Image (cartoon, rainbow, N blue to C red):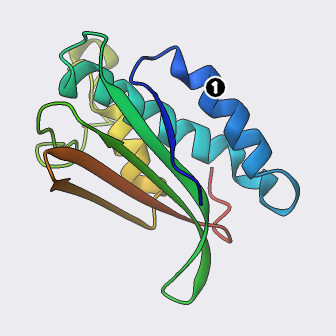
Amino acid sequence: METITLPATIDTLTVINKILEKTLSGKLEHMLFKTELVVEELLANICSYAYDGQNGGNAYFVCGEVNFDGKSCIMIQITDDGKAYDPFLNCKDPDLNAPLEERPIGGLGLHLVKEIATHYAYFRIDNKNQTQIILDIDNNDM
């Protein structure tokens, strides 16, 4: 799997989505929506929190098919060199039964990522944030 370095901006999603379309074409095409959703949420969090909404940093993106716990899966890894930020540390599950106007802003995207991921992890390595997501190819929920 090749690591692709891109600016850590929301505009980068257009480029990443084209890469995902190419990477997941054929037998993995049914995973495209889930994968795009996960990448969009992770990149939005990187832009908002690791770089405080400022441009200037990079995101290092890897995606491909891997074997995880004996299953064929999609692995997504996004690394950035912004300030330390674990997206899962303080991510509380939203109250989906609360009226919409009473719900706080934010958190629903990461909730979706956690729900559809087989595995998710955050690491701080060499002053870089690294987030890994594993999606089970055979899980067709969503």
Count of number-bearing discs: 1
Q: Is residue 20 left or right of residue 47?
A: right
Residue 19's image quarter? top right
Q: Name the one closer to the observer, 17 or 57.
A: 57
Residue 12 position (above or below residue 43): above
**Residue 65 position by quadrant:** bottom right
Q: Is residue 103 visible?
A: no
Q: Is residue 36 above or below residue 134?
A: above
Name the side, left or right, on which 131 lies relative to 51: right
Q: Nearer the viewer, residue 95 or 139?
A: 139
Residue drawn at x 30%, y 29% is 45
Q: Percent from the top left, x then y, of residue 92?
A: 17, 43
Residue 64, image quadrant: bottom right
Q: Which quadrant does the N terminus fall into? A: bottom right
For badge 1, the amino acid type reads Val
Q: Crowdedness of circle 1 by 10 Å Cα count: few (<14), some, many (20+)?
A: few
Q: Looking at the picture, how far across and down is residue 129, in whole percent? A: 22, 45
Residue 105, above or below 93: above
Residue under the image location 42 percent in, 44 percent down: 112
Residue drawn at point x = 28 percent, y = 11 percent: 101
Which residue position holds label 1?
A: 15
Residue 21: x %, y % from top left: 76, 40
Q: Residue at the spot x=63%, y=25% of the render?
A: 15
Q: Nearer the viewer, residue 11 or 35?
A: 11
- What is the residue that sits farthest to the bottom in this orientation? 70
